[in-house]
Image (cartoon, rainbow, N blue to C red):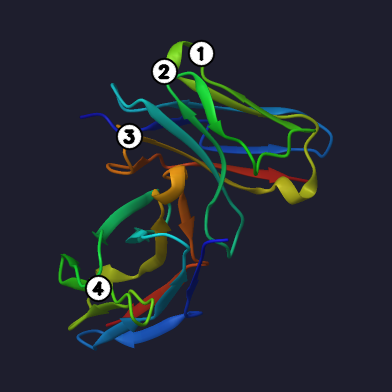
Amino acid sequence: EAGVAQSPRYKIIEKRQSVAFWCNPISGHATLYWYQQILGQGPKLLIQFQNNGVVDDSQLPKDRFSAERLKGVDSTLKIQPAKLEDSAVYLCASSPGGGTGYTFGSGTRLTVV
Amino acid sequence: GDSVTQMEGPVTLSEEAFLTINCTYTATGYPSLFWYVQYPGEGLQLLLKATKADDKGSNKGFEATYRKETTSFHLEKGSVQVSDSAVYFCALSDLAGGATNKLIFGTGTLLAVQP
């Protein structure tokens, strides 16, 4: 079974620029999550999708972050404009649902300079 | 709100030493508890889990018991190896009351095992 794929692996941008991350979940997994992991902290949920609908985006800074999951499969997370404090690893995870079977991708490490 | 507190690192041990990483939680419902491990340059991997009080999760020689009375889920291993060097995260997921099954993580504990 293929894992959760994320790209790019690394990204360096200047503040005020925009950036997008891509995630391809495990086939058949209805639930997709984006987490932000700042250095020295545990991952924090940004947004959760169930198929192509948003379940929880209460921690997403909506003035600069946006996410979509077209056709209930792949997802993109965008930051526009980026701030220095957005430097973090962005983790995508998927699960079949029901609180079981979480699988994380390797993440995208974003550095904002 | 729900939260997880785990001991700060780094924890430095010699090979074959006994490991304990403390984790306590606060939750309004009846959470499931997890330990995740993150090896250098890799994503998070589920190490073990427990879904109800007194359950013991175990994997690769690691164990943790869900203690509702002390709201704890301490990670233990009897004899660590160099290959166990990684960051360990305690987490909970609370489905009670219609909550989403998001994971709430502790800050992580870096374990460094020396030969």
Q: Earlier in the sequence, mark 3 or mark 1?
A: 1
The disc labelled 3 sits on which kind of residue?
Answer: Gly
Q: Quadrant of residue A62?
A: top right
Q: CA distance from mark 3 to mark 2?
A: 14 Å
Q: Contact, CB < 8 Å: mark 3 with mark 1? A: no
Q: For numbered disc 1, what is the local secondary structure?
A: helix
Residue at 65 percent of width and 44 percent of height: A59
The disc labelled 2 sits on which kind of residue?
Answer: Val
Q: Is residue B99 left or right of residue B15?
A: right
Q: Are marks 3 and 2 on the same chain?
A: yes
Picture layout, residue B105 above or below residue A52: below
Q: CA distance from mark 3 to mark 4?
A: 24 Å
Picture layout, residue B78 above or below residue B103: below
Residue identifier under label 2: A73
Q: Nearer the viewer, mark 3 or mark 1?
A: 3
Q: For numbered disc 2, what is the local secondary structure?
A: loop
Residue identifier under label 1: A70
The disc labelled 4 sits on which kind of residue?
Answer: Ala
Residue identifier under label 3: A97
Picture layout, residue B31 above or below residue B24: above
Residue identifier under label 4: B64
Q: Is residue B16 left or right of residue A4?
A: left
Q: Contact, CB < 8 Å: mark 1 with mark 2? A: yes
Question: Where, quadrant-wise, is the C terminus of chain B in this rendering?
Answer: bottom left
Q: Specify few, some or many for label 4: CA neighbours under 10 Å numbering under 14, 14-19, or 20 or more.
A: many
